[in-house]
Image: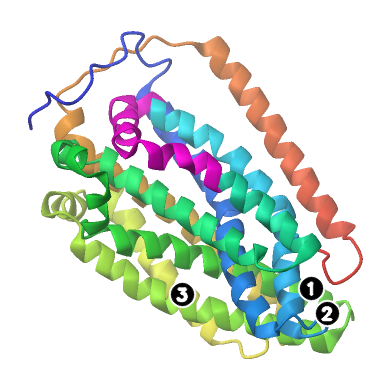
Amino acid sequence: MNTDLIPALDAAGLPGPPWLFHGLLVFTFFLHLIFMNLTLGGTLMAFVANLRGGGRPADADSVFARRLMGVNTYAISLAITTGVAPLLFVQVLYQQYFYSGTILLGWIWFNLLVLLMIGYYAAYLHKRFRGPWLGVSAVAFFAIAMTHVAVHLIHVQPEKWAQFDLGALSVLRDPTYWPRLFHFVLAAVTFAALVAAWWAVRRARAGDDVALNTTIARSAWRWAIWATVLQMVDGFILLGVLPKPVLLGVMRGGLPVLGPLTVSILFGIGLLMMLARVSNPVEKPGLVSGTLAALTLTIAVMTVTRHQVRVLYLEPATSQFQATVVPQWGNFTLFAVLLAVGLGTVFWMVRRVLTSPAEGDEAA
């Protein structure tokens, strides 16, 4: 590979062993995905449900939409907060490539902050004024997903930077772009739908407006089933359109690479079987909770596979550079302590919401 366009390594070196930052990148990105899925999937479903509800306050679809946006009261903020750490670890490990990818996208990458603010405030404007704001929020978050997928595909393909420099939007013609985008979008819809179903089942089992919550649980369950079916199909398409060297790297990667991929495929099939067994989620609360837990575990395993595919994409370039390691254990210790405190705070917040929920239809 011609490395002329790849910037030099940071002379300061890595502040710790590479395996540590690879692990932290995967772990923190998984945490980000949990809240990102609620934000993106929940907003998209809420937009559709709100249209179907026709603005009628007592309609089950309208209540479903309000409930999803109630969850997003927390999820949007937490998606932004948890997105900082994986962004930093990407820059630690792949600063030569990530920065170049964002520079090639230029104004599109800078507009990410604009889109984020629009999506964030439009969600709150919807809760207060209704109108078109929910659609604005859904479009903004979907555009953010498109931007992140574009940056990812540009930064892992330095051999195409000269082509992207002539027109960065040519990344939309990359064979993996749309399958990759919809793989994440469908996963987000599935996760948000299962969380909504789990919450509706919880409220129905507690005797709170049983008929309404049963209807919402069934509707959310249908969303989860069809999104999972489409995602399974899309996942195999994505695997098939990977560049040949990357696909061969996956197939020949042995247990460390094939293991997580195989497990995620089996989990996906198992998840679909669990979803298909339920016609009325309220009657099977244990299976609903188990399905949500299985999906969360599937997301964790797929996060590992995603990172391994990134490593395979970049291997021809990264193999030609050798980063020095200059440990900064004091800074790492401070980060570890703050991460533990932050996770503890988020756990306390979620537990408080679940044990002492707000009253009314908009309670999350």
Q: Which type of secondary structure does the marked residue at label 2 adopt? A: helix
- Identify which residue is drawn at 23% across, 16% down: 8
- Residue type, numbered disc 3: Thr
Start-end of magenta stretch: 92-115
| Residue 147 x, y percent position in the rendering | 40, 48
For label 2, the residue is 205
Screen quadrant of the C terminus:
bottom right
Asked whether 138 falls inside the magenta stretch, the response is: no
- Badge 2 crowding class, 10 Å Cα cut-off, few under 14, some 14 to 19, many 20 or more, is some
Q: Mark 3: which secondary structure?
A: helix
Closest to the observer: 286 or 213? 213
121 is higher (above) or lower (below) than 88: below
Q: Position of residue 276 (x, y in %)?
A: 52, 86
Q: Which mark is residue 177?
A: none
Query: What residue is rendered at 25% in x and 44% in y?
Result: 168
Whether tag 1 and tag 2 are in contact, CB under 8 A, the answer is yes
Q: In front here: 264 or 175?
A: 175
Q: CA distance from mark 3 to mark 1?
A: 22 Å
Q: Are marks 3 and 1 in contact (CB under 8 Å)?
A: no
Quadrant where the N terminus lies? top left
Question: Which residue is rendered at x = 52% and y = 12% of the image?
Answer: 329
Whether residue 107 appears in magenta in the rendering, the answer is: yes
Query: Which of the 4 quarters of the picture holds residue 129?
Result: bottom right
Q: CA distance from mark 1 to mark 2?
A: 5 Å
From the image, tell me which residue sits under label 3. 228
Q: Viewed as shown, does residue 16 lie left or right of 50?
A: left
Specify which label sits upstream in the sequence, 2 or 3. 2
Look at mark 1 in the image and give the residue it sits on: 202
Q: Secondary structure at mark 1?
A: helix
